[in-house]
Amino acid sequence: MSSRTVNRIAVLKGGPSAEREVSLVSGRECAVALREEGFEVVEIDAGQDLAARLLDVQPDVVFNALHGRWGEDGCVQGLLEWMRLPYTHSGVLASSLAMDKERSKRTFANAKLPVANSILVSRVAASNAHPMDPPYVVKPNNEGSSVGVYLINEGANGPAKLSDDMPDIVMVEAFVRGRELTVAVMDDKALMVTDILTTGWYDYDAKYVEGGSTHVVPADLPADVFAACLDIAERAHKALGCKGVSRADFRWDDENGVDGLILLEVNTQPGMTPTSLAPEQAAHCGISFGKFCRWLVEDASCAR
């Protein structure tokens, strides 16, 4: 953790990705919390003039509250490295790896972490025929927050009719039945396990629409499964080279014990509102939202 004096913070929010609206909320909430912590905060809606805005603001630290492509995939991180501005969360390589689902899964598999079988196919191919036996999931290879996710159930008559907004290449992944679990990692240490309860698929609305899901913190799990979640989340964080805070998402088939636990992905910039999953786990561990944001600022650096 840096010993430098931090007075002025630029909070990056919004941006051009499919997760813009979520990022605007994260950025706003973080800005409020950091002001309450005594920092001078300038909020910047990240656009093509971002470098000029940062030169004008001259922040001591950049708090990256962007989600999705350009803000979470190594692009903004590269700009901040070039400008030698200390910033929060993961660096260029870890951010790029985590956003690319196929490459991150390859990294997890090399680290002996459990992942679901998957393949990359063209959008056209996925729309014309079943790429694998249902049930399976079709999703962009480089988006987050359940943007553009299609679940093809067992017994489906035909493949998904994918939106034209989907990228040319998509990931097709074997569906893992069971419960949705998540673990936040802070300073290389797993915080807690949350059980996410929904009435259906954990899609974009379930994540962000009020009442879309219920969070059980800590999750009521067998001790060995709980411990395995914490261990796998820490190992995934380190395998990608993440910094600051990350969040690992799991599916758990409770009929198969620890062997039913599958790592889906790691989010290097998880949602940042007081009721988002990572801050919620921090709060359970006695870390207020303001202190959580302060820690990220104090952890910020270049060459991450």
Image (cartoon, rainbow, N blue to C red):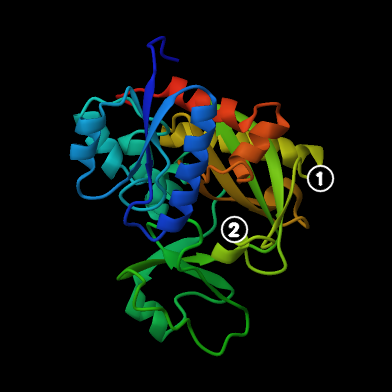
Quadrant hosting residue 232: top right
Could you tell me which residue is drawn at 23 percent across and 38 percent down? Answer: 53
Location of residue 223 in the rendering, given as x and y in whole percent from the top left corner:
80, 37
Residue type at numbered disc 1: Asp
Tell me the distance, in whole angstroms, between the alpha carbons under discs 1 and 2: 20 Å
Image height check: is 199 above or below 11?
below
Residue at mark 2: 207
Could you tell me which residue is drawn at 41 percent across and 79 percent down? Answer: 162
Could you tell me which residue is drawn at 45 percent across and 25 percent down? Answer: 297
Residue at the far top: name it. Answer: 3
Closer to the N terminus: mark 1 or mark 2?
Answer: 2
Image height check: is 182 above or below 177?
above
Location of residue 21 in the rendering, given as x and y in whole percent from the top left corner:
45, 57
**Crowding near pointer 1: few (<14 within 10 Å), some, many (20+)?**
few
What secondary structure is marked by label 1?
Answer: loop
What secondary structure is marked by label 2?
Answer: helix
